[in-house]
Amino acid sequence: MKYISLLFKTLLFLFIGINAYIIISGKTYVYKAVKIGYIRGHNTATIEDVQFFETRIVASKNGQQWPEAYNYNKTNITDKLRSRLVKNQSIAFVIIQNDSIRFEEYWGIGSRKSRTNSFSMSKSIVSILIGIAIDEGYIESVDQKIIDFIPEYKREGENFNKDVTIKHLLTMSSGMNWQEDYYNPFGVTAESYFTKKLEKLMYHIDFDKKPGETWNYQSGNTQLMGIILARATGKALSEYASEKLWIPMQATDDAKWMIDDTNGTEKSFCCLNSNALDYARFGQLFIDKGNWKGQQLIDSAYVEASLSTDLTDHYGYSWWLYNTQYKYPVFCMSGINGQYVISIPELDLVAVRLGHKDEKYVNNTTTDLKYYIKEIIKQYENYIEL
């Protein structure tokens, strides 16, 4: 009984201490994290979280579904590939080749109409919108300073705030004081996901390393790009994405972008919610150098720059690059838990995998993504001319 009493008192003091820290530090967003995460058995964000957040619609109009290929779903994926997909709790696996659906399969909550979290795949989408905003004159170039749009960063102190450019944000080389961590409930990444004051959070984060020298993956970079786009264009990020991408690319369904609060700010570093076939459009757009069915949506020179290496050999303007690791060059949109848009230009192929789990991260990619790419190439490289 004494042991039980001591354990109870210890847990009680721990509970009181944690709550005191949360209240004193102002990190009350943790209560929401506990409610929608830990109580439901999750230790990080999930692809179904949209139901717990305010959202803004990315509207579609006159959408048109991809045509089905002559051998649609007649050439099955291998048992080994399906087993790996099932093991990782996939909800969708789609192959688009030669602008047609060659294969698609769904599990669990997945379907043509399902709407799940893109996570960091949205970083590539925000990058595209930056290029369009440059084309339209809202932004001078990728070399424009971020303080031109966010004067809140004009402050004294030992920081490099005034030196950071949009290109530094695009290439994850800004030197931001940001620790990327998807499991620490008290970390800045979790706070940016759950807080109702996202812009206020961002303006308290300085750049403490010289920009342009070191690659460091940080979601805060893309969040600032979303704020810059909204200020530069005078439109909410969702509205601009609808006008410049969702409608002209003929997306079949409205998407939802999670925002921090009612009439608030989009979580641009993540949190666009759509389906596999509409996500695939972004991969095809970049395979076609920014052109969608004869309409140039983004300057081809920006597409080329986006898919070029700078500080690293695996990252461009918020796109993951694999130029030499496989039989053909590959570029990807990628989000946690295994949200992937895989583009292989030489095969005119876009593959999309969505799901609940990914695998170990090794040498700038997850082991499951590496496996999917190799299997896709083996199975579909013979169909390019058909």
Image: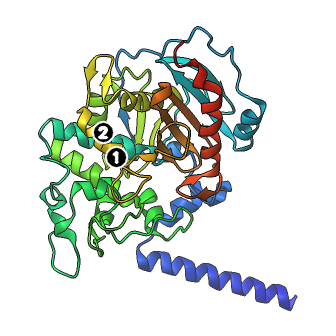
Q: Is residue 64 visible?
A: yes
Check disc 2 and report its element: helix, strand or loop.
Answer: helix
Say if 58 sits above or below 121 in the image.
Answer: above
Residue under the image location 52 percent in, 15 percent down: 385
Residue under the image location 31 percent in, 50 percent down: 265
Residue at mark 2 to residue at mark 1: CA–CA distance: 6 Å
Check disc 1 and report its element: helix, strand or loop.
Answer: loop
Is residue 16 toward the left or the right of residue 175 in the image? right
Going by the numbered disc 2, the residue's amino acid type is Glu
Position in image of residue 249 (x %, y %):
35, 23
Is residue 73 toward the left or the right of residue 207 in the image? right
Is residue 164 toward the left or the right of residue 7 in the image? left
Q: Nearer the viewer, residue 15 or 203?
A: 203
Position in image of residue 225 (x %, y %):
28, 52
Q: Which residue is mark 2?
A: 304
Say if 208 sits above or below 260 in the image.
Answer: below
Position in image of residue 128 (x %, y %):
31, 39
Say if 100 sits above or below 239 in the image.
Answer: above
Q: Nearer the viewer, residue 248 or 365?
A: 365
Image quadrant in which the C terminus is located: top right
Position in image of residue 55 (x %, y %):
40, 41
Residue 308: mark in rendering: 1
Residue under the image location 11 percent in, 39 percent down: 137
Is residue 11 toward the left or the right of residue 339 in the image? right
Q: Nearer the viewer, residue 239 or 118?
A: 118
Say if 362 sits above or below 121 in the image.
Answer: below
Dot 2 and dot 1 residues touching (CB under 8 Å) = yes
Going by the numbered disc 1, the residue's amino acid type is Ser
